[in-house]
Image (spheres, rainbow, N blue to C red):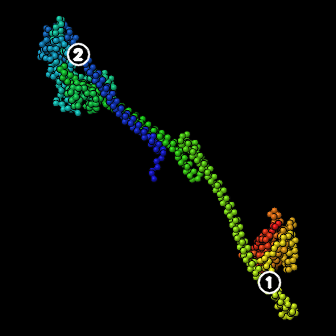
Amino acid sequence: MPRRFPIQLKLTLGSLFPLLVAILVCWLTGFYLIGSRIGTQAQDKVRTDLNSAREVYLNELEHIRDVVKFTGRSPQAATALNRGDRKTLDTLLTPLLNNEQLDFLNVVNAYGQIVFRAGNPAETDASRWSSRLVPRLMSGEEVSGTMVIPYEELLKDNPRLAERVVIPVQATPRARQYTKKYERAGMFLVAAAPVKNAGGAVVGALYGGIMLNNNTGLVDKIKRIIYEGVQFDGKDAGSATIFLGDLRIATNVTAPGGKRAIGTLMSEQVYDRVLLEKRKWVGRAFVLDDWYFAAYEPIFDPDGKAVGSLYAGMSEKPYLKIQGQLNLIYAGVLFFGTLTGIALSWKMGSRLARPIRELENHARRVASGEREVQIAVMTRDEIGDLAEEFVQMTRALSQREEEIRNLNRDLERKVQERTAELEDKNLLLVRTREELVRAEKLAAIGELAAGVAHEINNPMAIIRGNAELLQMAIPEETPSREEVDTIVQQVGRVERIVANLLKFAHRERKHPGKSDINRLLDEILNQVGHQVSLTAISVQKRYAFDLPEIEGDADQLRQVFTNLILNAVQAMDGGGVLTVTTKNNSTDGDCEITIADTGAGITRENLEHIFNPFFTTRSSGTGLGLSVSYGIMKDHGGRIEVESEPGKGALFRVIIPLAQ
Ligand code: ADP
């Protein structure tokens, strides 16, 4: 048998499956969108941050340019330069160097020779400055940019820079191999402007700059401006760095110890892209020990050489945290959504399945024979309709069953009636057959008896005549006279038998007349009294006095009642009660005569034979009395019935129609 798969589970799974698919898709899409959105936004932000950082960087350069430009226009400077007046230049430029916090401020003459160093006024080395820039300055142009100045040179410009310039290189994971242990070159923001005399002719040039090595002021300014002190986990979220080549020379990125990561290197991947390919890097980058959203761009010197790089970036952690939190919220919402979905769909499934289960229950009860099944209207839907139909069906079923039961009852009654009728008919048939048999028997016996009687009559007449002659001839006192008397007596008996036989065989024709039965019975009782002694017998007459005269052969009727009364008297040998009753059944058109005795009674076995001719239990009986009476009654359209119990007597009932 296939496994049972309940409707509730099916509904739950059915509604849950699309929900789960939708939730899964939302989940994945959400994860992807959050991740990519945050990534894109972070990249956009660091790109803008880098732009801002560049602006701050260029502003700083602008400031130096303004300083040198305006000082270069001063006639005093031109005059002093013309005259080679180092003192005046010192008075003019040294305060400027200090006030504007420049790291060096030099003056070159029209030949490009450095004639004065405000950062190191004592220095008299008049070596030539940049052969490429000086001509441009002499033509009146202003020049500015980032420059890398070798250690020996920068010490000439300002010996105090020795403290800040040297940066010990530290091993950095994922960075390229750095060849030097210390970086001694300095990276500077440098601006140069021509010095013009009163006539406007260029007499020399002024150039100054600030060193970027260990210059935390600039990077902190950048960070302050673009990240406005945003912190994460107690640390600044954003950072800015200035690289000399791939070496951090000014930064607020911190190393694991919490110190600024000056002297560490950018990752090789970024180096290749920014310094070798001279392209921007915007994206995830490994900074020191962690992943950052970072933007790098190359810093070019006035000759167009990529000498360093500017970086702005933020740790990924806050974003990852936000992303994690968002994912968590999202997952939570989806999780609870799923739970609610499961609960709702389970609940809905259960609501749908409950009435179905109830119906199933009812169906089972109906199947087991219960009919009084009540179903409340459960739901207003197809299931409700089904329940309604089910109730109707049960009602119809119970009606049909009631009808069938009634039909069965009718059928049973009819069968019983028919069976009873059939039994009656059978009984009638049996009786008729018995009658027929008896009639046939009687007819055959009658014929035989008639023949025998006829044949016996003549010899009997001769025997009688001769016997009577003998009687007359032999005197009474003669000893042989007794034998002759016995012969005459027995001949008389034989004649009676023969007469009875003839009566039985050729039943005499009826002589219709009217008889008063009560009177007839009285006469018979009277006559019987003469024949046999009735002294030991009490005769009780219970006559119906409204008995009308009946039609029939009076002699034949007399014979019947005489037989019955004699039989009764003979049955009560030691005395008893003889009850003769007459009853008027005029409604049925007949009358009933019963002759009851308290004699020996008739055994059950004999009851069947007593109406048969020659059946007798008496030694002197002929066995023809009852059979003849039976025939007479039949001729009159009546009948004789008998009831008897051995030892208690017998009752013979004669029923005769009042009219023939
Ligand atoms: P018979 O009287 O010559 O014997 P019946 O035909 O009159 O012939 O009776 C047949 C038999 O029926 C009797 O021999 C007797 O056994 C029985 N019988 C008739 N009437 C009675 C009765 N009243 N009580 C007992 N037995 C009877």
531 or 360: which is nearer to us?
531
Residue 64 is marked as 2
Mark 2 residue crowding within 10 angstroms, few (<14) / some (14–19) / many (20+): many
Quarter of the image for the C terminus: give it. Answer: bottom right
Residue drawn at 20 percent across, 14 percent down: 142
- In the rendered view, tell whether residue 546 sits above or below residue 310: below
The answer to whether 524 appears left or right of 603 in the picture is: right
Mark 1 residue crowding within 10 angstroms, few (<14) / some (14–19) / many (20+): some
Rendering coords of residue 363 (x, y %)? 55, 49
Element under disc 2: helix
Residue drawn at 87 percent across, 76 percent down: 526
380 or 22: which is nearer to us?
380
Rendering coords of residue 643 (x, y %)? 76, 71
Task: Name which quarter of the figure residue 601 lies in.
Answer: bottom right
265 or 549: which is nearer to us?
549
One can see residue 366 in this view: yes
Circle nearer the viewer, 2 or 1: 1
Mark 1 lies within 8 Å of ligand 1 (Cβ measured): no
Q: Amino acid at mark 1?
A: Asn
Rendering coords of residue 611 (x, y %)? 75, 75
* Structural distance between the alpha carbons of marks 2 and 1: 194 Å
Residue 457 is marked as 1
Q: Earlier in the sequence, mark 2 or mark 1?
A: 2
Mark 2 lies within 8 Å of ligand 1 (Cβ measured): no
One can see residue 650 in this view: no
Q: Amino acid at mark 2?
A: Ile
Task: Name which quarter of the figure residue 97 lies in.
Answer: top left
The answer to whether 100 appears left or right of 348 in the picture is: left
Q: How many numbered markers are drawn?
A: 2
